[in-house]
Amino acid sequence: MAIASSSSSSSLHPLHHQTLFPKYTRLSPNFLNFQPRLRFSSQKFLSTIRASSAVALEPNLGTEKGKTLEGEPFACPICYKPLLRKGPPGFNLSAIYRSGFKCTKCNKTYSSKENFLDLTINAGLKEYTEVKPARTELFRSPLVSFLYERGWRQNFNRSGFPGPDEEFKMAQEYFKPAEGGLLVDVSCGSGLFSRKFAKSGAYSKVVALDFSENMLRQCYDFIKQDDTILNANLALVRADVSRLPFQSGSVDAVHAGAALHCWPSPSNAIAEICRILRSSGVFVGTTFLRYTAATPWIALPFRQRILGSYAYFTEEEIKDLCTSCGLTNYQSKVQQSFIMFSAEKPSD
């Protein structure tokens, strides 16, 4: 992996720093203790491209001047056709930030908004807005994004999560068949695992993908502090997990850490993951189980009340969901309410 020089580092800085993490003068003392778990468990760039510049980019992204470079992974989230790219070559934060993308079929353009590429269907819209379920909107909060790796995620160990380092090692074992390929870390949050995957050097490209703008800003903030991945083959992309901006059969590995229970429609999301995976591609995810064999029977009738707005599943439901979406070779590891599961796209 390329190592960033000090001059490269100085050209990157967090944009809109004053508004990125607004001051919260008073927090509930229990806020850091919040976690989506079961209580009854036994346990700067110089470029001036912005989202608003999409129309200005359009004349430069025609069929003659724009081109789809070999290995370009991105596709239109509307029609899934490959996007034409105009900008510097390379797959890293700076190159992607300075590039514009266009779908010649839908005639829609996409570009970087602040420090991430916005590939949502709603990108560039001025009037229409769309609100997701509460469990999705929560993670778009600047405060939650700021605190995710500063106390929030650490609480997951109470439900059996072994910790990011161990979870990364476990995932890497499942991803061995996908080494050297393209890995997409969906619902990446603040990029806790995206950064680890990029640092590992095991993949040709890593895409840190999330719907939350603030999570992606926080991910960038962490990346700019680490020269070892500043110029790595890593891109930050905003997208909807139920409408992934990749061509069918173009991705070697998909990771979703502690995400399944937050998705508005897990079945749509996993069907999309299956669509973008190559033959024999690997999907690895972690989540909280609704209950396990160790859950006291007396707690079972109250599980829906305890779950709140999150969608937790049993291990059997997760396996059924994966297989019904066309994935095979399902495997899992369970520890208290923590589960890591893996499934593959059938070979051709």
Image (spheres, helix red, strand yellow):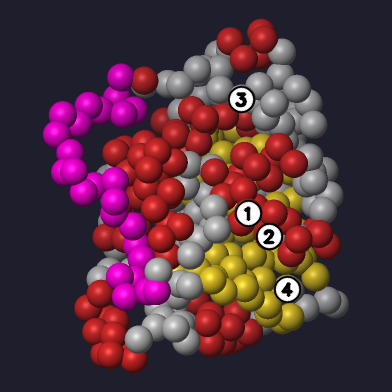
Q: Is any part of residue 43 visible from this angle?
A: yes
Q: Nearer the viewer, residue 176 or 92?
A: 176
Identify the residue position indicated by label 4 in the image: 344
Please state which of the two labelled residues, at mark 1 or mark 3, is closer to the viewer. Answer: 1
Residue 166: which disc?
1
> Residue visible at 51% across and 24% down?
49
Distance from Cα at disc 2 to Cα at disc 1: 6 Å
Residue 216 in the image: above or below residue 97? below
Distance from Cα at disc 3 to Cα at disc 2: 24 Å
How many other residues sit within 10 Å of disc 3, few (<14), some (14-19) or many (≥20)?
some
Residue 162 in the image: above or below residue 102? below
Please state which of the two labelled residues, at mark 3 or mark 2, is closer to the viewer. Answer: 2
Name the amino acid type tagged 2: Met
Give x and y (percent) for residue 297: 34, 91
Please state which of the two labelled residues, at mark 4 or mark 3, is closer to the viewer. Answer: 3
Magenta stretch encompasses residue 223? no
Q: Is any part of residue 107 visible from this angle?
A: no
> Residue visible at 56% across and 22% down?
225
Distance from Cα at disc 1 to Cα at disc 3: 21 Å
Q: Main secondary structure of the magenta part?
A: loop
Name the amino acid type tagged 3: Asp
Magenta highlight range: 18-42
Name the amino acid type tagged 4: Glu
* Marks 4,3: beta carbons within 8 A: no
